[in-house]
């Protein structure tokens, strides 16, 4: 993806904050800022150094040829590490006479300490500059997320034919992952949650070897990844005929999900969307079982800005992508979560998740 506008947005922030240079090294921000495709992975040794008029991409020889190809036609100048990437980066800063350097707050402490020791000037910790820019997606980014969401829908349709009593949570999770990967997902967006019965009462349950059983909820939270961009969806089934208690919980969560989606629009404080969905569960007498925020941003990371919760200070921006995922979790019985992915638009939102939400009994 062409990313010159992202570089310019970061430079405008440098000027506004009166900071001459920034080093970026978190993997998602590297990928976002450069737009390099087929270069940046979770194991890369790399950093971007950006000043108000220059941009350098530092990496080692393992990535040098791919980086050289990706940088053609862009503003990025490639520096290949000789011995120590951050020593050489700091030497280049000294040669340019730059005395103040911004560093992301998300970097590991050891890296921050090393840069601070090597750099002759002062180091300024900054928080969320690129993450703020990343909130509003371009059409290309939205297309990638939509494709990932469509693949997630297909995986759900597929797994409905696989789930039956006796299948283990792990088998269901693997079937979802195999389908996604076989059909174009470049990895998965996160570790899938497949939780049956009492395990489904834990919002972020792991995957176990417990068989799913008749008379239980089965909660599945999963997502694909296309060109680095994530999707995120949760659906909850009942194994066997649903009881009145199953239906009461499910219908309450579905009503909260639909109310939350209806509340989404550009400019609204994110906490108001949370409170709209929460009010539905409160009216049903189930709000004490809703134990997390309503949603979060999705993009290169499956959890990014904005946050959609009771303490959020974010306003929803047109072009951002967020989840709407109310849940009710009753310890010892089970839990329901229904999660959809939406694009925030002026006056409303656009659904990216299209899997059925009526209660499914298998």
Image (cartoon, grey):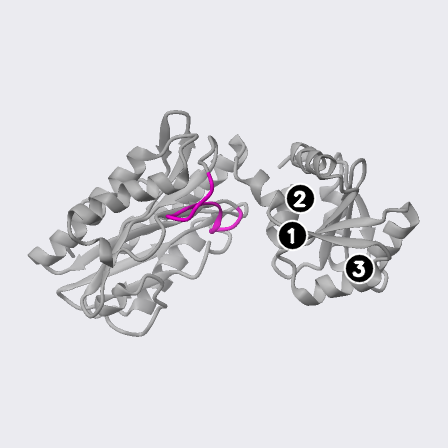
Residue numbers of the magenta segment: 300-314
The label number, if any, that marks residue 209 in the structure image? none
| Mark 1 secondary-structure assignment | loop
10 Å crowding of disc 3: few (<14), some (14-19), many (20+): many
Asked if 246 appears above or below 35 in the picture, the reply is: below
Frontmost residue, 77 versus 110: 110
Pointers 1 and 2 in contact (C-beta within 8 Å): yes
Which residue: 34% across, 66% down?
205
Which residue: 35% across, 68% down?
207
- Residue 150 can be seen in this image: no
Separation (CA) of disc 1 from disc 2: 7 Å
Instruction: Name the residue beneath numbered marker 3.
Output: 86
Give left or right: position of 342 versus 133: left
Report how many numbered discs are placed on residues in the image.
3
- Residue 119 can be seen in this image: yes
Which residue: 22% across, 49% down?
253
Instruction: Name the residue beneath numbered marker 2.
Output: 36
Separation (CA) of disc 2 from disc 3: 21 Å
Give left or right: position of 127 versus 161: right
Extreme bottom residue here? 209
Quadrant for the C terminus, please.
Answer: bottom left
């Amino acid at each position: 993806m062409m990313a010159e506008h992202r570089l310019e947005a970061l430079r405008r922030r440098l000027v506004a904050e009166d900071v001459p240079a920034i080093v970026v090294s978190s993997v998602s921000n590297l990928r976002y800022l450069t737009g390099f495709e087929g270069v940046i992975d979770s194991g890369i040794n790399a950093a971007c150094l950006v000043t108000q008029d220059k941009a350098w991409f530092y990496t080692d020889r393992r990535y040098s040829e791919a980086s050289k190809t990706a940088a053609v036609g862009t503003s990025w100048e490639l520096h290949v590490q000789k011995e120590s990437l951050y020593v050489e980066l700091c030497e280049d800063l000294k040669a340019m006479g730059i005395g103040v350097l911004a560093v992301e707050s998300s970097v590991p402490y050891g890296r921050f300490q090393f840069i601070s020791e090597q750099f002759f000037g002062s180091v300024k910790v900054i928080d969320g500059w690129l993450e703020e820019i990343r909130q509003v997606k371009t059409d290309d980014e939205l297309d990638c997320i939509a494709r990932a969401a469509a693949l997630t829908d297909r995986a759900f349709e597929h797994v409905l034919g696989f789930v039956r009593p006796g299948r283990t949570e792990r088998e269901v999770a693997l079937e979802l992952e195999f389908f996604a990967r076989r059909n174009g997902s470049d990895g998965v967006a996160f570790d899938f949650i497949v939780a049956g019965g009492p395990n489904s009462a834990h919002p972020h349950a792991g995957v176990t070897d417990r068989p799913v059983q008749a008379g239980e909820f089965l909660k599945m939270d999963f997502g694909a990844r296309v060109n680095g961009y994530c999707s995120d969806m949760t659906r909850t089934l009942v194994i066997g005929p649903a009881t009145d208690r199953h239906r009461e919980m499910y219908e309450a969560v579905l009503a909260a999900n639909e109310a939350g989606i209806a509340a989404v629009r550009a400019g609204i404080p994110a906490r108001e969307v949370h409170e709209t969905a929460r009010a539905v569960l409160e009216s049903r007498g189930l709000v004490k079982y809703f134990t997390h925020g309503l949603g979060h941003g999705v993009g290169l990371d499956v959890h990014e800005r904005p946050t959609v919760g009771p303490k959020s200070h974010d306003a929803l921006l047109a072009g951002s992508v967020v989840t709407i995922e109310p849940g009710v979790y009753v310890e010892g019985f089970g839990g329901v979560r229904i999660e959809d992915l939406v694009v925030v638009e002026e006056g409303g939102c656009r659904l990216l998740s299209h899997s059925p939400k009526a209660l499914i009994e298998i």
